[in-house]
Image (tube, rainbow, N blue to C red):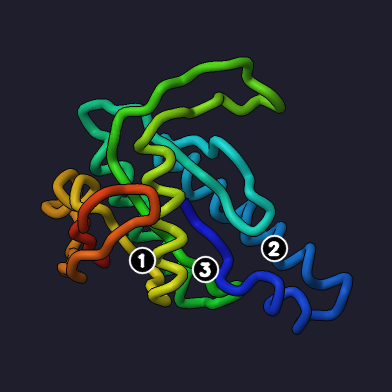
Amino acid sequence: MADIESSTQFTKRLPLEEAPRVTGRWLADCKQIIDDSSGAINKFLGDGFFAYWIEGDDTAASVARALAVLKEQQVREQPRFRVVVHYGKVFVGGAASLGEESLLGNEVNFVFRMEKMASGLGALRLLSEAANAQIKALLPTREEGRQSLNSFEGDYLFFSF
């Protein structure tokens, strides 16, 4: 999941006609990064997106490549955005609307709560412990400590990349 930091304030700082161009260009660039790494955007969120990869032999390498490119994109800060990554099994269900699969389950809820927590911490790049286990051999990561997540019991270990 990726989300523009303080998107309301960001768009208010830009001329009226510039905000949709900057946001649209960022979303298009990110979509290309996800597509090039064999991922898919499940849902555009207005100021971000929710992407996923189908598990396979080279999925971890594909995700690591996408994260490395997204990290390079973050350096430009046009706009400044946050990336959070979780690994887990989800259910595909319900009727697809607007070409989007409906992804359901606790793992989907987890990543949305994780993004809220990362926002509160001011973290730009965050991996869940499960995601870190999948890509740590492919992408340098650093332990960031344990945090609680709203609606989930206990504390969870997170990593940055």
Say what amino acid the circle numbered 1 marks: Arg
Residue at 77 percent of width and 64 percent of height: 21
Q: Earlier in the sequence, mark 1 or mark 3?
A: 3
Of 62 and 7, nearer the camera is 7
Of the numbered discs 2 and 1, the one sitting upstream in the chain is: 2
**Residue 58 to residue 50: above or below:** above
The image shows residue 78, relative to residue 91, as above or below, that is below
- Determine the CA span between mark 1 and mark 3: 9 Å
Mark 2 or mark 1: which is in front? 1
Q: First in sequence, mark 3 or 2: give its number.
A: 2
Which residue position is annotated with label 1?
125
Residue shown at the point (54%, 35%) measured from the top left? 42
- Residue 44, x across and y down, in percent: 63, 45
Q: Is residue 22 left or right of residue 44?
A: right
Expressed as whole percent of the image width and height from the top left, the position of residue 149 reads 34, 56
Query: Which of the 4 image quarters holds residue 110?
Result: top left
Residues at circles 2 and 1 in contact by the CB criterion of under 8 Å: no
Label 3 to label 2: alpha-carbon separation: 11 Å
Label 2 Cα neighbours within 10 Å, binned few <14 / some 14-19 / many ≥20: many
Residue 81's disc number: 3
Judged from the image, the secondary structure of the residue bearing numbered disc 1 is: strand
Find the distance from the CA under tag 2 to the CA under tag 1. Answer: 19 Å
